[in-house]
Image: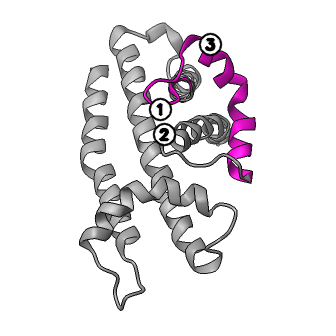
Amino acid sequence: MAGQALGFVLEVFFGLFIYGFLLRFLMQAMRAPFRNPAGQAIVALTDWAVKPLRRVIPGAGGYDWASLLAAYAMQVVQFLAMFAIFGSGFASITGGAVLFVLASAAIALVKAAIWVLIVVVIVQAILSWVAPDGPLAGVLNAMTFPFLRPLRRVIPPIGGTLDLSPLVLIVILNLVLMVPVRWLEQSASMLMR
């Protein structure tokens, strides 16, 4: 029971930073505004690592590579910490185990990005009914518009007002989690053998 509690605390601690770095990368990639409470909180949470990393890894192509690298590094550290505490420690780390950790961290970031998008779509859908002009509307719209726009071209609103494209996007994203991402996870687990 104490092991489960420790694992939960580690997941929450590392998850806070992993999702913070990942959100910073995604918000910048989607050109979402940072001048809102959520954007300012993400910047405050991640500046300690992103600013020094930017001196070494500058942004290129409109992407904040330092934020993505920080998310990946934090994910690797989380897996190593879990392996050291709950696995057999570092005595049994082989080349296959190192590859497994590196591949698993990359796959975990892909899963996290998909979950971020699912949550953002749900929050945007709810807030569009409750507070369509709220302080987060710009961020949510910027992060979902590139994904919803192609679906809205194909799926017309029902009755002229009910937009089903968020629901369809959530179904598609869940299918991506179920098939290709699960296949990647199974492939990564073969590295340990």
Query: Residue at the spot x=28%, y=36% of the render?
Result: 184
Q: Which mark is residue 29?
A: 2
**In front of the other: 94 or 181:** 181
* Quadrant of res 154: bottom left
Could you tell me if the residues under marks 3 and 2 are in contact, i.e. CB atoms within 8 Å?
no
* Category of crowding for the residue at label 3, using alpha-carbon neighbours closer than 10 angstroms: few (below 14), some (14–19), many (at least 20): few
- Of tags 1 and 3, which is closer to the observer? 1
Query: Residue at the spot x=53%, y=36% of the render?
Result: 25
Could you tell me if the residues under marks 1 and 2 are in contact, i.e. CB atoms within 8 Å?
yes
* Category of crowding for the residue at label 1, using alpha-carbon neighbours closer than 10 angstroms: few (below 14), some (14–19), many (at least 20): few
Q: Secondary structure at mark 1?
A: loop
Q: Is residue 41 left or right of residue 189?
A: right
Q: Which residue is tagged 1?
A: 62
Does the magenta run of residues contain 65?
Answer: yes
Alpha carbon distance from label 3 to label 2: 19 Å
* Category of crowding for the residue at label 2, using alpha-carbon neighbours closer than 10 angstroms: few (below 14), some (14–19), many (at least 20): some
Q: Compared to 132, does 30 lie above or below?
A: above
The amino acid marked with disc number 3 is: Arg
- Of tags 1 and 2, which is closer to the observer? 1
Q: Which mark is residue 55?
A: 3
The amino acid marked with disc number 2 is: Ala
The amino acid marked with disc number 1 is: Gly
Q: Secondary structure at mark 3?
A: helix
- Highlighted range, magenta: 37-66
Does the magenta run of residues contain 17?
Answer: no
**In front of the other: 111 or 32:** 32
